[in-house]
Amino acid sequence: MKKILALVLALALVLALSCASAETALEKVKAAGKLVVGTEATYPPYEYLDDNAQMAGCDIWLAQQIADALGVELVMQDMAFDGIIPAVQAGQVDLGIAAFTVTPERAEVIDFSNQYELSNQLLIVKAGNAEKYATKESLAGLRVGAQLGTIQSQLVESALPDSELFELPTYPELGLETVNGNIAGFVVDQAVGEAMVASGDGSLEVSAFAFTAEEASFGKAAVLQKGSDDLLAAVNEVIDKVVNDGSYKAAYDEAVAATGATGE
């Protein structure tokens, strides 16, 4: 009798575990009552800390729209950029929103949402060097910076093969290295670079250098754990709505203006 009871209990446990494992990504979010989103809050206008040390930016706005649509609380986690995808893979966060560029390499390990923004790339240099570093030839043999783990790092290597890639965790650090003359400049999304120049002390400027559209016109998307099909569908529904009705663009424009006003 004891053996039969033990067998019944074991089967019940297996059944319970099977049911638990069958819970979908969207069901887990709704059951938890919160959407946990990983970001890296040093990248205005997409994500940054405002004057009250609160997360702000058009990507944070987008995350809030998704949480509201799901009827759950938004919980933002600030972390190193190159740690967000591993956190998504490990299930530590439900999704990552941090101006992620869509690439085939990333798509092998995570799922991308629909794109919500397209960004050109700039080379930011020390004030006075805009014309000095205006061609690939002028950058040959020099160090060009990019944020660690970003598509900009790949862009430097592919579009500027005669330059040396120099990586740091954040763009403020790269800005300092540029001002100090340790690197020729750094590559960054257009809005971010323009915000850094506009809100700075005049020590940085946008170079006359230009990447071609084929080299650098990058779509932005959220990243999710592979297999999160129902959550991905819900995220895409929100993204399509805010892109089509213009509200994401309005949030983007507001964040561009705010980053200059807050001194970010």
Image (cartoon, rainbow, N blue to C red):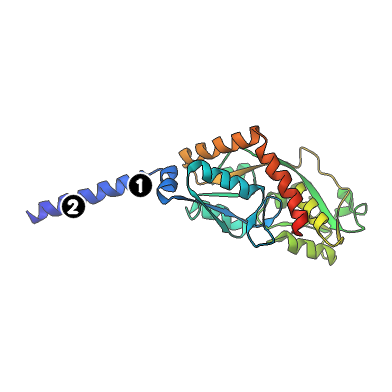
Kind of residue at disc 1: Ser
Residue 61 or residue 96, whichever sits in front: 61
The answer to whether residue 54 is visible is: yes
Q: How many marks?
A: 2
Residue 148 quadrant: bottom right
Give the image location of residue 48, x and y in percent: 67, 56
Give the image location of residue 26, x and y in percent: 44, 43
The answer to whether residue 156 is visible is: no
Identified at 68% across, 50% down, the residue is 46
Q: Is residue 228 above or below residue 139?
A: above
- Disc 2, SS: helix
Give the residue number, with chain letter if any, for mark 2.
9
Tell me the CA gap for discs 1 and 2: 18 Å
- Disc 1, SS: helix
- Please rate how many residues cluster around mark 1, counting C-alpha atoms within 10 Å: few if below 14, some from 14 to 19, many from 20: few
Identified at 37% across, 44% down, the residue is 23
Sequence-wise first label, 1 or 2: 2
Kind of residue at disc 2: Leu
Image marks 1 and 2: residues in contact by CB distance under 8 Å: no
- Please rate how many residues cluster around mark 2, counting C-alpha atoms within 10 Å: few if below 14, some from 14 to 19, many from 20: few
Residue 248 quadrant: top right
Q: Is residue 115 left or right of residue 123?
A: left
Q: Is residue 22 left or right of residue 121?
A: left
Give the image location of residue 264, x and y in percent: 74, 59
Give the residue number, with chain letter if any, for mark 1.
21
Q: Is residue 202 above or below residue 95?
A: below
Identified at 81% across, 40% down, the residue is 212
Residue 163 or residue 106, whichever sits in front: 106
